[in-house]
Image (spheres, rainbow, N blue to C red):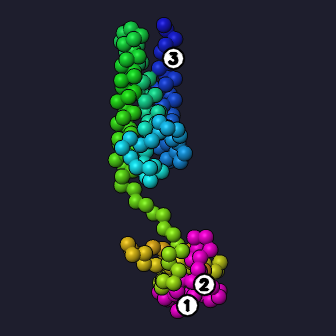
Amino acid sequence: MEKVHLIYIAFLAIGGLGLLSSLIFGDFHDGDLHGDFSHDIGGHDGDQADSPKIFSLRVIFAFLMAFGIGGGAMFLAERGLIGQLIVGFLSGVATGAITYYLMKFLYSFQGNSNLDSETFIGKNAEVTVETTNSGSCQVKVDSGGGDQLFMAKEKNSVPLKLHETVKVVGRLGTVLIVEKS
């Protein structure tokens, strides 16, 4: 029975280190366990990539950490193994749920920044950073919902000056190809 406390310490350490690493290194890009059970409850299939999952690594790490704390506290209070497991499980579920709903709340403030630069072909743009030694510049294009900034190159390698108006004639990846109007 004495070695049970090592399990609680291990769960606490794994959960804490996992949450700390997500804080330091940012979001786990593919940190969700994939499968039929990982679908967002009440969500839509179209927004799966932009919302947290019930079984994401952050939720699992939060569960493990809280399980270690709850079960360990009951162990230190000299309660029975069943009581330790019940309190550990309930505190883990509650903390996992709080983590999930907090992440869902925070993710709701994210905007979709995916713009297809091909939609700007044929539009006019304004040079916001003149041509550098590498031949690149930055242009501002009206996207309909506000101005968007893009890296650009002049089609004929003509240096562009600040505030010049250019026309978008193509793209190379995410770099717009422009020419003087």
Q: Is residue 24 visible?
A: no
Where does the magenta region start and end? 155-181
From the viewer's side, name the closer residue of 41 and 135.
41
Q: Which residue does the numbered mark 2 point to in the structure image?
A: 154
Pointer 1 with pointer 2, Cβ within 8 A: yes
- Residue 35 within the segment the image draws in magenta: no
Q: Alpha-carbon distance for marks 2 and 3? A: 64 Å
Q: Which residue does the numbered mark 3 point to in the structure image?
A: 6
The numbered mark, 1 or 3, whose residue comes first in the sequence reads 3
Q: Alpha-carbon distance for marks 1 and 2? A: 8 Å
Q: Which amino acid is tagged 3?
A: Leu
- Residue 161 within the segment the image draws in magenta: yes
Q: Which residue does the numbered mark 1 point to in the structure image?
A: 180
Residue at horizontal 37 percent and vertical 17 percent from the top: 86
State left or right for residue 160 relative to residue 39: right
Element marked by disc 1: strand
